[in-house]
Image (cartoon, rainbow, N blue to C red):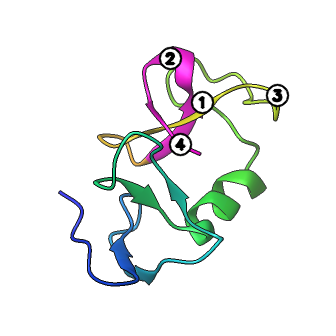
Amino acid sequence: MLEIQVGWFRCEACGKLKLLTGRAWRSPYGRGFGVCGDCYEAWNRVGRRCPRCWAQVKTSQAMAFFPGLGRFGHFECGGALLA
């Protein structure tokens, strides 16, 4: 579970405690989930591949995060929606 303090959150991908800034991706459905911008940028540099279907996630598609895998992918493949 994500430990939320004032202005801080624990990244689901790397596990580091991060300051909540505009570079963080949060779930639009609640405050219990987030991924830092550094983890997103690392995924973006390696080709934006979905861990379920291995297809590239295009910018027009809904992006999601797979907590058990620690990777980003398509929302249609069963990940948790991020905004």
Q: Which residue is mark 3?
A: 60
Q: Is residue 14 above or below residue 46?
A: below
- Span of residues in magenta: 71-83
Q: Callout 3, which amino acid?
A: Ser
Q: Earlier in the sequence, mark 3 or mark 4?
A: 3
40 displayed left or right of 67: right
Q: Earlier in the sequence, mark 1 or mark 2?
A: 1
Name the front one of labels 2 and 3: 3
Q: Which residue is mark 2?
A: 77
Q: Which residue is mark 4?
A: 82
The crowd level at tag 1 (other Cα within 10 Å; few <14, some 14-19, many 20+) is: many
Badge count: 4
Which residue reaches farthest left?
Answer: 1
The crowd level at tag 3 (other Cα within 10 Å; few <14, some 14-19, many 20+) is: few
Image coordinates for residue 42, horizontal then vertical, percent: 66, 62
Q: Earlier in the sequence, mark 1 or mark 4?
A: 1
Name the front one of labels 1 and 2: 2
Q: Earlier in the sequence, mark 1 or mark 3?
A: 1
Secondary structure type for disc 4 = loop
